[in-house]
Image (cartoon, rainbow, N blue to C red):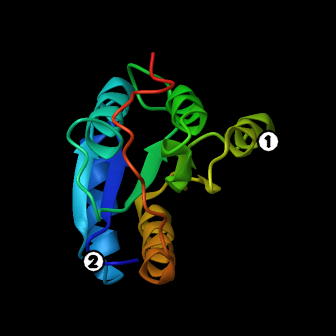
Amino acid sequence: MKKTAVILIAEDNQTNFELITRNLQRAGITNEVQHLTDGRQTLDFIFENVNGPAHQHNKEYILLLNTDITNVDGTEVLRKLKQDSELKKIPVIALTKNDDPSKIELCNDLGCSICIVQPSDSENFAETIKKIGLFLAVVELPQINSNGQNQGQA
């Protein structure tokens, strides 16, 4: 992942957000991080800044999405992103506390890149995030070409 890539973290729990960022840094990830605290803010930010009027060229994005995020559910955020012809290119790592196979299948059906069941204890969660960081260090992200239209947003 290029250093110019922005990591969008959609997480409504401040403690989890801090744990995620700290362990990404421990894995050597020093990219810009944008904290999005609920589903509505996530959609607004992405449709405005990633594929809208405030689009910055030469930036790549990846989304770490808490599927249980407040305001607009994470699966609905995922559904809206994947309906947009450009935004569907954004890799989405879905983090869920629910190990229900139907929830995981839904995330995969909606187009997430990977769905990870979030361990309940902070030590295992931290280790999981470090592994995500190692993955992010080697992954190539697609460019988003802004068309200035907010397709698919509700």
Q: Residues within 10 Å of mark 2 (few under 14, many from 20)?
A: few
- Residue at image x 62%, y 56%? 113
Please report whichever mark, 1 or 2, sits nearer to the chain's N-terminal start. Answer: 2
Point out the image quarter for the C terminus.
top left
Helix or strand or loop: what does disc 2 sit on? loop
* Residue position for label 1: 101
Disc 1 and disc 2: Cα gap in Å? 35 Å
- Residue 122 position, x and y percent, is 41, 59
Q: Would residue 93 be found to the left or right of residue 41 on screen? A: right
Quadrant for residue 70, please give it. top left
Label 1: element kind: helix
Q: Nearer the viewer, residue 128 or 137?
A: 137
* Between 114 and 96, the one nearer to me in the picture: 114
Q: Amino acid at mark 1?
A: Pro
Number of dots carrying numbers: 2
* Residue 114, image x, y percentages: 63, 57
Q: Nearer the viewer, mark 1 or mark 2?
A: 2
In the current view of this chain or complex, which residue is farthest to the top?
A: 154
Q: In the image shown, does 146 or 93 lie closer to the viewer?
A: 146
Residue type at tag 2: Lys
Where is the N terminus found, in terms of image quarters?
bottom left
Badge 1 density bin: few <14, some 14–19, many ≥20, Cα 10 Å: few
Would residue 108 be found to the left or right of residue 71 on screen?
Answer: right
Label 2, on which residue?
Answer: 3
